Structures are given as structure tokens and as C-alpha cells.
Image (cartoon, rainbow, N blue to C red):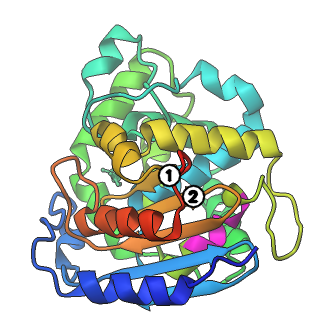
């Protein structure tokens, strides 16, 4: 079904938010991300009829960072099924995205697949039985296939920048390794993790790639099934409860949609049965989630009546 007034609404929101200066701070702990223009603002919405609405910098590629964790979770579930949940939980952490604090109590098992520790454990599972280069190729080809766009690339400068400075992630990985949660050499797992976080995609490409999550596991354009309906529902559930780290409750409260943020300033949001949405504004709030991105989704959900909790 086509969402009514979609392009008008997206254009209005873009107009209202683009010039705002209260947009938060760009992440600097990955030096290469600090070079991004903080005034960038993009939005793309794809509905079930194939209608695509875009605003602002919707076609400018940005670093997807933790948004990649939705797709690595999807791939890992395809490989391991429910066995995945032996090495990672599915409870909100209430802690920062790169926190180590809960790992000790939980014997190295991360709280969920969307915090850094959890995503590193998921990446390690995808890597098992492969060379790092093959595993990374598999992740990249999955993104290209879902978005129907073979031009999607990894930004090597961002990956190298994080590889040089990612001591916190390295600590998380070694700590998990000490509990036997990771199977592969830590530097292999981290190499694949940093590179999939460094995939560069535009709002339009991400909204296209995530169509299957909005439509019971199927690409609505081709009818091709990516995952079973039950799996799509469950991935959305984990996005709703854990997709914004210690800001997940607030995001659900304000927006009412499953969502996944990345420290590059992107947010992927799913309106089940209706649309897949991506917004991008690099300035972040105190939880490391895009500030204007969240506000844009709040406006969009309200104006198009998208919240999963009703009006
Ligand atoms: N690559 C980033 C990191 O590991 C991803 C974090 C994020 O997007 N919140 O720190």
C-alpha cells in the first residue's frame, strides 16, 4: 500500500530541520568520522508500494557504523539459527554502546547483539570457518544484494582509522575471548568488525536494504524472501528494545518504531507493514544517537501515523 502525502511530508520535515543548529556533536573518537560535515541532513522512506521519498542529502554515502549490526545479526541467524543466543543475550543493556561493565557478571556474554561487545560476538560467529576477507566479502555482498546496488563499498580510511584507535573494542574482544565466547583470533574478528562498521551507504540505499524487515521478511518489489516472517518480527523486537543503547527506552517512547542507530549519525527505522526509513544527521546526543535524526523520525511517525503503538 502507498503511504499518502509521503514526499510532501518528507520535504516538509527536511525543510524544518535542515538549518537547525542544535544538532549535537559529531563523534570524534574515530578520527576519520570527525571530518564529516555536521550540517549534513538526509532522509529516505520506501513504502510497500515501492514509492521512494527522499529529502536533503539522501544520496550522500555516510559511515553506517552500528547500523551494520542489524545486517550481521540477520546473517548470523541465517548461519546458526537460535544457537546464536548461546553467545549473546537479547536484553537491553541500559549502558553505553561500548561499555565493558556488564560482561564480568554475565561471564563474557554480551547483553544484546547491538552493543559493541554483542556485535563483535556476532561477527566472530560469521567469521568461523572463513578467512576474514571471505567473511567481509559475504557481509558486503549481502548489503549490495539487499539494496540491489553493487556499488556499495567499504570506506577503507574509516576502517583504518578505527583499527588504529579502537582500543576499547579490542579490550571488549579480549575480555570475551578470555571467557571462551569468541572462537577466532581476536585481531581477525576485530578486523572484520571494524570493516563492516565502515561500510558507506546513503539513506536511500539503507532504506532499500531494509525493506525485508518492514514486510514480513520479503522484498516487496520482487517477492523474494530474505528471512522467515517470524525472524523479521524478532529482529524488529530486538531493534525496538536494544537499538539505541541506553537511549532505547526514550526512542521507543518518542518514536514508537524499531530502530538502529550508528555513531556516524544514521538511524534505520522500520514501520512494520508500512515502510523502511533512514535518516542521517551526524550530530549526536549523550547516548551516541543522532539528535536531529531522532527528531525527524518523531515528526515523521506522528505525521504519517506510523508508531507501532497507534496514534
Ligand atoms: N564502529 C563503532 C565502534 O565500534 C560503532 C559504534 C556505534 O556506531 N555506536 O565503536
Examine the structure image and report whether residue 203 is included in the region drawn in magenta: no
* In front of the other: 9 or 258: 9
Q: Is residue 86 above or below residue 275?
A: above
The kind of secondary structure element at disc 1 is loop
157 displayed left or right of 306: left
Q: Main secondary structure of the magenta part?
A: helix
Q: Is residue 276 above or below residue 14?
A: above
* In front of the other: 151 or 7: 7
Q: Is residue 93 above or below residue 25?
A: above
Mark 2 sits on what residue? 270
Segment tinted magenta in the rendering: 207-212
The kind of secondary structure element at disc 2 is strand
Quick one: which residue is furthest to the front in this view? 311
Residue 150 percent location from the top left of the image = 68, 83
- State the image quarter where residue 175 is shown: top left
Question: Looking at the rendered structure, which numbered label has been put on residue 196?
Answer: none
Q: Of callouts 1 and 2, which one flags the residue occurring earlier in the amino acid sequence? A: 1
Q: Residue at x 44, y 38 (%)?
A: 242
* In front of the other: 67 or 215: 215
Whether residue 1 appears in this view of the structure is: yes
Residue 306 percent location from the top left of the image = 54, 60
Mark 1 sits on what residue? 257
Q: Is residue 298 above or below residue 54?
A: above
Residue 243 percent location from the top left of the image = 43, 45
Cβ atoms under marks 1 and 2 closer than 8 Å: yes
Quick one: which residue is furthest to the right in this view? 223
Amino acid at each position: 500500500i502507498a503511504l499518502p502525502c509521503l514526499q510532501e511530508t518528507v520535504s516538509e520535515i527536511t525543510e524544518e530541520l535542515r538549518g537547525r543548529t542544535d544538532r549535537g556533536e559529531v563523534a570524534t573518537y574515530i578520527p576519520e568520522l570527525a571530518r564529516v560535515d555536521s550540517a549534513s541532513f538526509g532522509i529516505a522512506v520506501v513504502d510497500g508500494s515501492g514509492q521512494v521519498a527522499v529529502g536533503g542529502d539522501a544520496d550522500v554515502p555516510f559511515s553506517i557504523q552500528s547500523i551494520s549490526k542489524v545486517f550481521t545479526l540477520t546473517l548470523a541467524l541465517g548461519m546458526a539459527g537460535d544457537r546464536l543466543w548461546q553467545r549473546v543475550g537479547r536484553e537491553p543493556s541500559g549502558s553505553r554502546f561500548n561499555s565493558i561493565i556488564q560482561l564480568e557478571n554475565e561471564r563474557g556474554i554480551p547483553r544484546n547483539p547491538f552493543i559493541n561487545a554483542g556485535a563483535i560476538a556476532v561477527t566472530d560467529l560469521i567469521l568461523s570457518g572463513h578467512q576474514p576477507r571471505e567473511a567481509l566479502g559475504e557481509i558486503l555482498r549481502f548489503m549490495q544484494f539487499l539494496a540491489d546496488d553493487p556499488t556499495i563499498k567499504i570506506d577503507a580510511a574509516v576502517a583504518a582509522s578505527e583499527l588504529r584507535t579502537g582500543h576499547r573494542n579490542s579490550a571488549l574482544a579480549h575480555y570475551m575471548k578470555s571467557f571462551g565466547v569468541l572462537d577466532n583470533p581476536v585481531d581477525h574478528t576485530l578486523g572484520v568488525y571494524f570493516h563492516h562498521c565502515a561500510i558507506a551507504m546513503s539513506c536511500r540505499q539503507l532504506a532499500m536494504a531494509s525493506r525485508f524487515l518492514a514486510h514480513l521478511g520479503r522484498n516487496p518489489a520482487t517477492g523474494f524472501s530474505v528471512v522467515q516472517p517470524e525472524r523479521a518480527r524478532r529482529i524488529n523486537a530486538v531493534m525496538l528494545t536494544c537499538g539505541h543503547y541506553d537511549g532505547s527506552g526514550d526512542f521507543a517512547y518518542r518514536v514508537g518504531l524499531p530502530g538502529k542507530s550508528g555513531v556516524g549519525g544514521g538511524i534505520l527505522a522500520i514501520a512494520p507493514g508500512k515502510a523502511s526509513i533512514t535518516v542521517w544527521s551526524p550530530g549526536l546526543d549523550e547516548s551516541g544517537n543522532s539528535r536531529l535524526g531522532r527528531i525527524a523520525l518523531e515528526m515523521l511517525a506522528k505525521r504519517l501515523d506510523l508508531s507501532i503503538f497507534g496514534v
